[in-house]
Amino acid sequence: MNAQAQQSGPMRLAPVTEVSEDKSSEETPTETSGAVLIQGLDAVPEDAVGVLSIFDGSLGDEMWAGTDWATALRLLDALPASFPILDARPLARRLLLSVATPPIGGADKSGLLAARLAGLVAIGAADDVIDLARAVNSREVPDNIATSVVAAHFLRGDTASGCEVLDRFGGGYSELFWQKARIICQIARGKGAEASLGLDLLRDERGETDSLFQNIAYTAAVGLPVTADQLMLPSDPDILTFALMNVAEAELPDWVVGSDDPAIMRAVLASQRVDVPRKLARAHEALRSGRIGADEVAILYEELTIDDETVSDALLDPESVELDLRLACLYLAARNQGVAVARSEALWEAWTLAKAVELDDVVMATTARLLSGVPVTADFGWLAAGATRAALLAGKDALAVSWYQLALRQGRSDADIARATVMMWPEMRVVGRTLSAADVSSDDALGAAAISSITPVAGETGATVPTTQSAGVASVKARAPVPWSAARLSRWIDLADNNLGMTDIGTVLYLLQVFGDPVSETQWARAPIVDNNGLGDKVGKASGNPKAMPSVAALAGLARASAAGRRAETVLYAMIVLGQVDESPHAGIVGSVVRGLQRVGLDTDAQAIARSLLVTRAQ
């Protein structure tokens, strides 16, 4: 392993340059070394600070290379809060948290850090906001980022910490955000008279611009409980209204609990003021619509206090347990089994019971993390097809590849598993088309001796693909975990042509071609001409429901940035493109995003986004 990956001591918060060997001064870098260390943080450009290095998921120290400061700020300000493809959010998060040299022309400027923090607030990453702010200054919050930090604390339900930041804010309270935040803090501290005065001033200055906020605040300021009638009028919930409801100890109304705003939604799911049934119902709805990940729901399950009797009833008498609670119990029943055989049987039973109520996608996705307790061996071959699908639904691509390889072997003697492997082949081909040396399985056709001498070479899409080199043996390209197979694709087309609910044939063929697979004209001839969503009538009749398209400027920007190799700029344009389409993005748009990410070396992210589209379409 690289020596830098094994280093102990303080976290590095900025791009690394060569460090002087002089040991005489450990407190600050030498004037000539050019080093940037945590001890010399005052010398680190604010916009360079991050919490992710190249060893834990950043986009690279030079991700802004070729991008000017003004363009970077403009694109960060345009970053969407939500995306129709779940795997876009982790990529956006990594960009916002990455340690990197600031863009061109930004040496004497600041502002990118504030934009990054605002982006993290918008996507509902409140914990990340706090971590990034602490990386800038562990003792106090600079005024230029205080708004995002206060918002993050409020989203976490930590009003006290948010108010402490407000107390130290030196920028005045002329902006509406700070005026409202100050009123919230006054109410939280029992200073009702001061809060009422602030509300009077706010109303005189701005009028009845937010009657809901003012109504709740006036009631809470005089120490009265907020009634359900006061919360009856739906509004667009924002962070400050959410925080005010928490301070007023009001029961969150359905229009807040059901908000699709990523920040509010995640705050609701973490809130102790939402009862378990409503929280679970919202979590399952958000999971099925692709707004949160399976692990987020599983973590929610882990935090519940459910007695063993209720968990047992979910298995033995399912109808006696409310549906959303039942799904959580199925997860917990499998988790409670520590022995591999018992765990596998509990998983299978959970999937079967969930399928009976057509919610197997929820249970399979949330329980995928529990597959870590089941070895991928022939003894569990009977579970392989289900485990593969569970891993795909959860976005655990490496896990899916491992179980899929076992399913292929098991399918030689089991027709049902063989059919399942064909049905999942397009998604598996997308995520299993390349591998690193560490991914080569012990039973690969190349053999153990060849595996030990794997070296990387450039593959078809610029990814790293292993080859074998040994004495007296010509270099041989290692076979991917899921190699190209025209026969398997044709068999998949046969199934898709006769089974409603499978992914549109044209979508699959198009994305496979984007990744460089040689789809034939004969296979293309099997693809019906359908509407923009790829979900139209089998005979080619369009539904008349055209797909929302992103702006031409965003698509053109994506093409220009990726062609020039500007990584961060490409990712931002890709996120903007995806954020401008609706919940069922056109395959052509996703293909443009995939191509762009591939061009700047983000093959794994490109594969994840394509897989996410295919898995969603197949449900």
Image: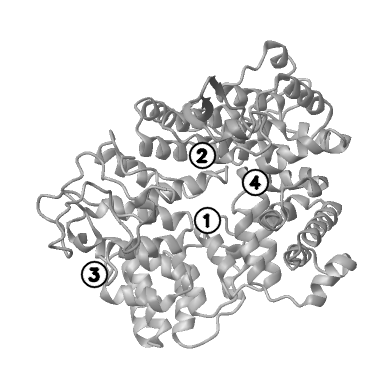
Sooner in the amino-acid sequence: mark 1 or mark 2: 1
Label 3 to label 1: alpha-carbon separation: 29 Å
Which marked residue is nearer to the observer: mark 1 or mark 2?
2
* Disc 3 from disc 2: Cα separation: 42 Å
- Label 3 vs label 4: CA separation? 52 Å
Which residue shows up at 53% across the image and 36% down it?
436
Q: Residues within 10 Å of mark 3 (few under 14, many from 20)?
A: few
- What secondary structure is marked by label 1? helix
Q: Which residue is mark 4?
A: 399
- Residue drawn at x 22%, y 39% is 104
Is the residue marked by circle 2 packed among few (<14), some (14-19), or many (20+) residues within 10 Å?
some
> In the picture provided, is 429 more to the left or to the right than 337?
left
Q: CA distance from mark 1 to mark 2?
A: 21 Å
Quadrant for the C terminus in the image: top right
Where's residue 90, x and y in %? Answer: 50, 49
Residue 262 - label: 1
Could you say which disc has been placed on residue 605 in the image?
A: 2
Query: Which percent across, then down, holds residue 170?
Result: 22, 70
Q: Amino acid at mark 2?
A: Asp
Element on which disc 4 rests = helix
Q: Residue furthest left?
A: 31
